[in-house]
Image (cartoon, helix red, strand yellow):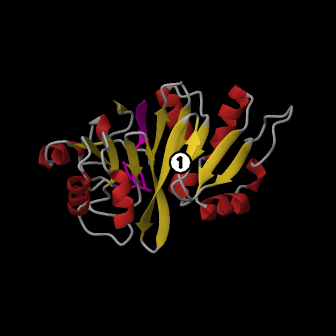
Amino acid sequence: MQITMLGVGSSAGTPMIGCACATCTSSNPRNKRTRCSSVIQLDNGKNILIDTGPDLRQQALREGLTQVDAVLYTHTHADHLHGIDDLRGFCQIQRSQIPLYGSPAAMAHIIEKFGYTLREPSNYWDLPVLKVNPISAPFELFNQSIIPIPLLHGNSEVYGYRIGDIAYLTDVSAIPESSLALLQGLKVLLLDCLRVAEHFTHINLVQSLKYADLIQADSTYLIHMTHELEFAALSAALPNNVYVGYDGLKIIA
């Protein structure tokens, strides 16, 4: 399978509005970060999208993404959800309903805030045609096992996901011991790394590297980064097998 990093930025994106720091004004395209999302292409050709950030349309156009068969939601903060309306384009192309998966709380939030998207297929495709599926345990999707990984995000519980030998952990402030047990034997780990300074709802660089060392994936890629982390400088400071993710990076696992 292949994972494509659609975006590795934090909620503000990089460059940030009104900022003239070295990262925001950098000419290095790997410092241009849209809001955090990835898509996994299974070996059978099915595409599983992780989150629908507000940059989804831009990301899909950039990557030539025209097929989304399902969406996994980590949580419902705006930078991970508010591109949900852009799923209409995929529904129109595919002429099919797209299933959404996430925690019961996440699905309840989508029902409350984006109920207009939850429809059965008909002859009209002017709106998204979506269906919520609350999950709280491993399940099968397109003949692939999907394991939700409970994480802490400040005072909230959110999900990461393990799909085969790939795990995606964004918006993490702590990983419970029971969840660490689900992350053994990974080939690829995508891991939250907000900034250098500590933060209440996200792990920082030091904490991310500690978790990477604890989990021991073959390769770890840092995601959900603010403009405080400049690509070249950070890349030069990382240990072996830990890399800086960037928009458009594709990894086969």
The residue under the point 65% across, 58% down is 107
Figure quadrant of the N terminus? top left
Image vertical order of residue 45 relative to residue 209, above or below: above
The residue lying toward the viewer, choosing from 49 and 166, is 166
- The part of the image, by quadrant, that contains residue 192 is bottom left
Give the mark count. Answer: 1
Residue positioned most to the bottom: 155
Residue 82 shown left or right of residue 174 in the figure: right
Residue 160 shown left or right of residue 213 in the figure: right
Query: Is 160 covered by the magenta stretch?
Result: no
Residue 216 shown left or right of residue 162 in the figure: left
Figure quadrant of the C terminus? top left
Which amino acid type corresponds to the residue marked 1 in the rendered image? Asp
The residue under the point 74% across, 29% down is 95
* Residue where numbered disc 1 is placed: 51
The residue lying toward the viewer, choosing from 125 and 168, is 168
The percent position of residue 24, horizontal first and vertical second, equals: 31, 48
The residue under the point 23% across, 57% down is 214
